[in-house]
Image (spheres, helix red, strand yellow):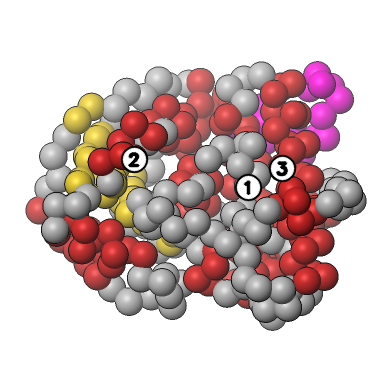
Amino acid sequence: MSLSHMHPFLKTVYEQVTLSAQQQKLVWVNDQPTQDDLDHIMREGSSTSEFDSNNLRKEVLRDLQANRAKLVTKTCKIAKVLAVIYPDQEARIPWDIFANIFAAFGPSHRKPWRFVWFANKMPRELPPPMEKPVAGHMNGGYTYPCDPSAIVVYREEEVARVLVHELLHAACTDAKEDMIELVEAKTEMWAEIFLIAVLSAGKPRLFAQLWKIQAQWIADQEYLLMNEHGVQAPTDYAWRYTVGRRFVLQGFGIDLPGPSADPRANIAGSMRFTSPAICQ
C-alpha cells in the first residue's frame, strides 16, 4: 500500500513519527544508577498500587535484592533506562526499539526521560468466561502526568507498547476535559498506532501490513470481551483499553474489520493489547 492509499489520519501519524524518529540516531551506552535512581527504584518497587494488584513490581524487586535479578542501566543523550531483569532476559531487551521510540518523541523539555522497567514475566491473560477483566489481568505500567522522570513498566510482555503509552501521559498529551476512561482509550489507541509507525521503520507497506494485523486483533479481542466477558461500557474497567479503541477510531473515520472466523483461536486467551505478530 502506498501513502496515497492510506487513511489520512494513519498517514499523518506514520509520517510524523517516521520523520521524528529519523531526525536523530540514539546510541545507548552503559551507565551507573545515581542514588536518586536507586531511591526511585526502591520507592516504586515497594509501593502498593491498585493497578499492580499482583504485586509484580515487589516480586522483581525482591529478586533484585536476593541477586536473582539484576539492574542494567543505559543512557542515551535524551533518556535513561533502568531495567531490572532476569539473566535470561538480557538478550531480549529491545534496545533498538527503545531508541527509536525515544527518538520519535524527542527530548523532554522538562527533564530527561527516565524509564524504570521491572521485567516481570507474568503474561496478560483473560479471566474465565463471564468474568470481567480487572487491572491485574491487563495493567503493566504507569507514570505521573507531565513527569518524564517517573515512567514505570512492570511486565516483560508488551514493554514497547506500554512504554509508548506512558510516554504519552508523561508528555502531557491528556485532554483535561475528558473523563479518565476516554483519556486512557485515546492514549492506548495513539500508542498502538505510534508503535506500529516506529516498527515500520519508514516502510509504508510494512506499516499497512502491521496495522491490518492489529486491527483484526482489536476486533477479535473486542468480540470476546463484549460477548464472553460482559465488557460493554466505560463503567467496565477493561473498556478504557480495549472496547473503547473502536470509539476513538470512529472519531477519526477509521473502521475496524468484523471478527474473524474464530476470534478465540486468534486471541488464544491473551489480554495483551497488541497482537504478538506486531511486537513481543
Can you tell which mark lies on residue 214?
A: 3
Residue at image point 58% right, 22% down? 201
Rendered view: 150 above or below 232: above
Residue denoted by label 1: 274
Residue denoted by label 2: 89
Residue 164 can be seen, yes or no: no
Tell me where the magenta segment starts and ends, as one range.
1-17
Residue 55 can be seen, yes or no: yes
Q: Earlier in the sequence, mark 2 or mark 3?
A: 2
Q: Earlier in the sequence, mark 2 or mark 1?
A: 2
Can you tell which mark lies on residue 12?
A: none
SS for dot 3: helix
Q: Badges 2 and 1: C-beta atoms under 8 Å apart?
A: no
Amino acid type assigned to the residue bearing label 3 in the image: Gln
For this rendering, which residue is in front, 55 or 178? 55
For this rendering, which residue is in front, 162 or 228? 228
